Amino acid sequence: MKHICQLNDILSELDNHDGYFRDFINTEHIQAGILRLRVNDIDVQEPHPVDEVYYVIQGDGMIDLNGKNYPI
């Protein structure tokens, strides 16, 4: 089954519900979603049991991978 999500629809949903995160792919092997962080926000999620995809749409920051920080 094919499920297509439009970025603008997901962002509007986050705006309308004061949202922080929304999955748009969640399978046995991979998870993808939109995580919106504002200036000085910190991602408080714990690591997930499946692979994750991070794609930065706008802005910059740091990501901690295995105890080492990398710029994004």
Image (cartoon, helix red, strand yellow):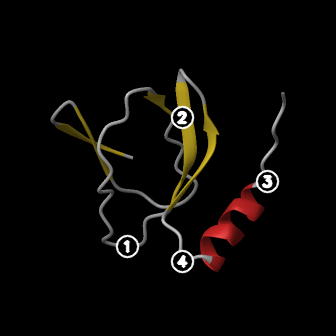
Residue count near mark 1 (Cα–Cα under 10 Å), binned few <14, some 14–19, many ≥20: few
Q: Mark 2 vs mark 1: which is more N-terminal?
A: 2
Residue that label 1 marks: 39
Q: Amino acid under label 1?
A: Val
Q: Residue at x 42, y 71 (%)?
A: 38
Graded by Cα atoms within 10 Å as few (under 14), some (14 to 19) or many (20 or more), the crowding at tag 4 reads few
Circles 2 and 3 in contact, beta carbons < 8 Å = no
Residue at horizontal 37 percent and vertical 73 percent from the top: 39
Looking at the rendered image, the disc whose residue lies closer to the viewer, 3 or 4, is 4
The kind of residue tagged 2 is Gln
Figure check: 49 above or below 19: above
Which residue is found at the position 30% from the left and 71% from the top?
40
Contact (Cβ within 8 Å) of mark 4 with mark 1: no
Give the Cα separation between the discs numbered 3 and 4.
18 Å
Residue 6 is marked as: 3
The secondary structure type at the circle numbered 1 is loop
Whether 72 is drawn above or below 52: the answer is: below
14 sits left or right of 5 in the view: left
Q: Which residue is mark 4?
A: 18
Binning the other alpha carbons within 10 Å of mark 2 as few (below 14), some (14 to 19) or many (20 upward) gives: some
Circle nearer the N terminus (2, 4): 4
